[in-house]
Image (tube, helix red, strand yellow):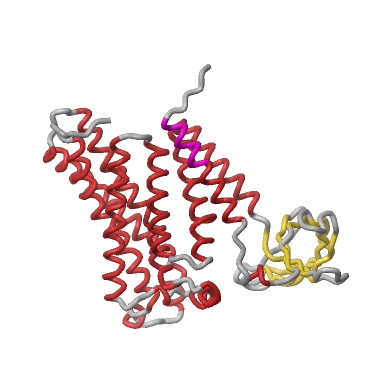
């Protein structure tokens, strides 16, 4: 059987090499603050081999509080195989109740050459379960959708690698967040859509439509943030991020722009892909269809699509803010005061700028698709 270096094979080969390079870069990107600045501190994984004592109770809120004494075998790190005893306290925000067999991530502090050490429970070990769940999800995509599902999973993996191992390390190292996020978004769009749809005309239409949507997002973000007097410095986590700004001179005020763009990128892509696919299918079923017919059909379908997507997007942003709304309610915050909270303004900025981009990406994609697929067009596969 002769191997052929097709466009698809070359595409997946080159992007896979790119992912390896990004992972290596991300793993080897070190910063000199945070936990990395703590000399002698490691976070090994351990397994509970014995619960020496358990003096915990469940309070009226359903949280388990109290103290445990745990005997834990270290599974990773320089002291792998050693067994240590841990005095473990459970409290609000750290209710990690361990049992025999529980896998834990430990905070282990020991200076070089010192005999004494300090160890405590940091959290449950969840990475293994995350990897297994991710593999099962990829398997589900493959089982249900076959080759198309696996191609879609490849796009998801690529997106994850770009954000975690390339975008975030570059921002933390002092790179311009907004510029980097836009560039990474264009890369994610191109690779994800080519992986799913292949080298087709509708892929190009979808990519162009999504890019135009990103442009509209940037415009609406600037306008709405200016109208609401909101900048990236208003995000609740900014105080914790201040050390990054002081150390790397990163423009952290742009992080809100980046976060909203990443959160809404999938929705904008969905709209563009749907409209591009519709115009392609209509053109195939009716080769005599011209620009006007395809555009009208595309806009008719986009109205239903935007209507359902609007609720999805708005509810997604509202759901992420639900706990804060409940806290405002329990504090008896007046309606007028509530509507002037910066957190409410941020959610309005998130929802409207993302939704406006999605709304305007639909007709833009319909125009491009109708021009490409309309009768007497000059584009060929």
Q: In the rendered view of the protein, which quadrant contains the C terminus?
A: top left
Residue positioned 71% across, 69% down in the render: 57
Residue positioned 33% across, 52% down in the render: 268
| Quarter residue 325 falls in | bottom left
Q: Main secondary structure of the magenta part?
A: helix
Q: Give the vertical position of 191 relative to 375 (above or below).
A: below
In the rendered image, residue 49, in percent from the top left (x then y), is placed at 82, 55
Q: Give the vertical position of 134 relative to 250 (above or below).
A: above
In the rendered image, residue 349, in percent from the top left (x then y), is placed at 33, 68
| Quarter residue 240 falls in | bottom right
**252 and 303: which is toward the camera:** 252
| Quarter residue 178 falls in | bottom left
Whether residue 14 is in magenta: the answer is: yes
Q: Is residue 110 left or right of residue 331?
A: right
Q: Give the vertical position of 119 relative to 131 (above or below).
A: below
In the rendered image, residue 298, in percent from the top left (x then y), is placed at 20, 42
In the rendered image, residue 53, in percent from the top left (x then y), is placed at 82, 66
Q: Is residue 7 left or right of residue 38?
A: left
Q: Residue furthest top?
A: 1
Q: Is residue 248 left or right of residue 224?
A: right
- The span shown in magenta is 7-16
Q: Give the vertical position of 340 relative to 187 (above or below).
A: below
Q: Residue furthest right?
A: 115
Residue positioned 63% across, 73% down in the render: 92
Residue positioned 37% across, 75% down in the render: 231
**216 and 10: which is toward the camera:** 10
Count of all numbered marks drawn on residues in the image: 0
């Amino acid at each position: 059987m002769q191997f052929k270096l097709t466009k698809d094979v070359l595409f997946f080969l080159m992007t896979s090499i790119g992912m390896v390079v990004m992972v290596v870069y991300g793993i080897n990107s070190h910063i000199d603050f945070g936990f990395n600045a703590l000399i002698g501190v490691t976070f090994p994984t351990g397994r509970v081999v014995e619960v020496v004592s358990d003096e915990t109770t469940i309070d009226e809120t359903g949280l388990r509080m109290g103290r445990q004494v745990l005997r834990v075998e270290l599974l990773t790190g320089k002291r792998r195989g050693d067994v240590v005893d841990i005095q473990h306290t459970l409290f609000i925000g750290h209710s990690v109740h361990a049992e025999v067999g529980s896998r834990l991530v430990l905070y282990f502090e020991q200076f070089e050459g010192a005999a004494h050490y300090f160890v405590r429970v940091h959290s449950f070990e969840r990475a293994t379960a995350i990897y297994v769940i991710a593999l099962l999800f990829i398997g589900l995509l493959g089982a249900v959708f076959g080759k198309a599902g696996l191609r879609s999973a490849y796009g998801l993996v690529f997106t994850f690698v770009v954000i975690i191992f390339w975008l975030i390390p570059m921002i933390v190292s002092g790179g311009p967040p907004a510029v980097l996020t836009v560039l990474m978004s264009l890369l994610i769009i191109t690779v994800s859509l080519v992986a799913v749809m292949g080298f087709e005309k509708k892929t190009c239409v979808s990519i162009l439509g999504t890019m135009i949507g990103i442009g509209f997002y940037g415009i609406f973000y600037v306008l709405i943030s200016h109208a609401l007097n909101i900048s990236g410095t208003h995000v609740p986590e900014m105080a914790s991020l201040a050390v990054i700004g002081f150390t790397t001179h990163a423009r952290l005020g742009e992080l809100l722009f980046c976060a909203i763009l990443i959160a809404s990128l999938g929705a904008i892509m969905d709209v563009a892909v749907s409209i591009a696919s519709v115009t392609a299918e209509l053109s195939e079923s009716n080769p005599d269809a011209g620009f006007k017919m395809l555009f009208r059909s595309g806009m008719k379908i986009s109205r239903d699509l935007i209507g359902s997507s609007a609720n999805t997007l708005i509810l997604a942003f509202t759901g992420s803010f639900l706990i804060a709304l409940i806290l405002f309610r329990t504090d008896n915050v007046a309606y007028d005061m509530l509507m002037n909270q910066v957190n409410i303004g941020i959610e309005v900025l998130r929802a409207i700028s993302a939704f406006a981009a999605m709304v305007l990406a639909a007709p833009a994609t319909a125009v491009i698709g109708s021009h490409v697929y309309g009768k007497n067009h000059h584009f060929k596969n």
